[in-house]
Amino acid sequence: MVDKKKIILVDACSTWLKKNEGQTDQVVLPLGLMYLSSHLKQQFGDSVDTSILHSVVDIKSDEQLREIIEREKPDIVGIRTQTVYRDEFHNVAKTVKETSDALVIAGGPHVSSDLDDVLNAGVDIAVIGEGEHSLAEIVAGKKKEEIIGIAYREDGRTVRTIPRVGIDNLDVLPFPDYDNIDMDKYESNLSYGFNFRKQGVVTTSRGCQFTCDFCHTTLGKKSRLRSAENVLDEIQELSDRGIKDIYFVDDIFNINRKRALEIFRGISERDLGLRLYFVNGLRGDLVNEEFIDSMVEAGTIWVSYAIETASPRLQKEIGKHLSLPKVRRAIEYSAQQGIIVNYWGLLGSHTETEQEAHQTIDFMESLPPSVIPYLFALKPFKGTDAHEKAQSTDDDLGSVYHNFAHLFRRNRFYMNVVRRWRDSVWSEDRLQRSTSILQNNGYSNEEIRAAYGVLYSSMDKSQLEGLLGGSK
């Protein structure tokens, strides 16, 4: 048993799509922190008082964060972040340190990516990888040197304890803590699916066994799967809460097709009237027609497929080894079902040539339109094989979304490649078809205006209204 502890968990993010006044940003529920909160409640019951804050949703200014910390007087503040939000992470850590005597803990992908940067922020403990057991041991008052899976500074040097092995049986974890989330606040921001709806976020697995060179291995290089029954029980609970829009955010949801089909069948049999979104996590060459038919029958309206590159040579170099003919069939068959289909390419792999970059655009142009268009520029984050290949310490990583400035500086030909992609995305035919698909899948004009407002920031208002009117 521990003394009553006040614990605040902060998802340190910042706006990344919002460009102008009147626009909203795209946010997702802080699922990792919700798992931590429910795990602490399971372990310690009324001995802990946890709350969850999201930088974009709950904290409008440094002063507001300061006021929250001064009012709540937390014993522990846990901060989760990604590398693209490192500035916000540093800002939150600094504010907490200046405002309280709380023990400050850091977690999330940025810890695995750049441990030195995290510890330079003045945090007391960095949790590496999965955080449930490490955080529970910290809360219980276990000595730092006895806790595995953490790092800290001592006498000016970095101390890393023995790595923690990931939780093998994920079914033992309690479901994420929705009681600590103000769903109305999230509903007022664009979701992962570019709409304003009450969202439930589900991960059915942890870890990924594939070897893409641009990915971190925060949760390990082994796919650990929850049972279909456990996943269905969580989805039922979300439905009972009145949540009908469910987002799957696995690294690879369909690594085990049999289990995936069991989940789809279970959802169909329960007849919950859900809308399902695969915003990521579907490996396209592991998808077949039976899989697509089953997921659409279960209520899927949104799928995304990562192509990365249409160059077979680069597919091998980046370690993805995707079968391009199979992913083409998956995209085309998915589009035939009338659902929202998205896919994306990735420019900037280490040895990519101009011809290979154009090859990716050729491939994308030959497919049905990506309803929400994506094209990414490689950001070789520390801790990835891509960073090692580039031998780069370039801090100009830009946004996680459509920022190509560093590629333009590296090779001018990327300007023509991106221009080609934008011309294709902006074609009247593709825009009209995409707008129609969104409307046919239940998107309101308000939601489409908000989505296009951030995707096509320079679109003329009359053109947008023409698209909406012409697609009814």
Image (tube, rainbow, N blue to C red):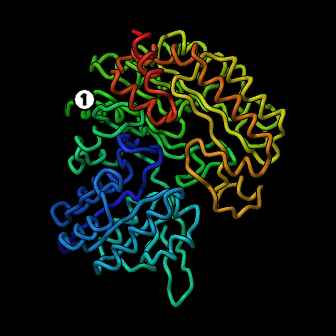
Rendering quarter of residue 355: top right
**Residue 140 vs residue 91, the one in the foreground:** 91
Q: Please indicate whether residue 197 sits to the left or right of residue 360 in the image.
A: left
Total numbered labels placed on residues in the image:
1
Quadrant in which the C terminus is drawn: top left
Q: Position of residue 32 (x, y in %)?
A: 39, 51
Categorize mark 1 by other alpha carbons within 10 Å: few (<14), some (14-19), many (20+).
some
Q: Is residue 234 above or below residue 439?
A: below
Q: Is residue 294 visible?
A: no
Location of residue 394 by image quarter:
bottom right
List x then y, in percent, for residue 231.
Answer: 36, 34
| Identity of the residue furthest to the bottom in this view | 155
The residue that appears at 31% across and 32% down in the rendered structure is: 196
- Which residue does the numbered mark 1 point to in the structure image? 239
Which is more toward the observer, 104 or 149?
104
Disc 1 marks which amino acid?
Ser
Q: Quadrant of residue 77?
A: bottom left
Which residue is rendered at x = 33% and y = 21% of the image?
A: 444
Work out which quarter of the rendered image holds the N terminus and state it: bottom left
Q: Residue at x 31, y 16 (%)?
A: 269
Inspect this view and state whether residue 338 appears.
Answer: yes
Query: Which secondary structure, mark 1?
Result: helix
Counting from the top left corner in percent of width and height, residue 136 is at 33, 65
Q: In the picture provided, is 64 more to the left or to the right than 148?
A: left
Residue 291: % across, % down: 52, 18
Between 323 and 225, the one lying in front of the other is: 323
Say which residue appears at 35% left-offset and 41% top-offset.
Answer: 22
Q: Along the line of sight, which residue is nearer the eye, 468 or 291? A: 468
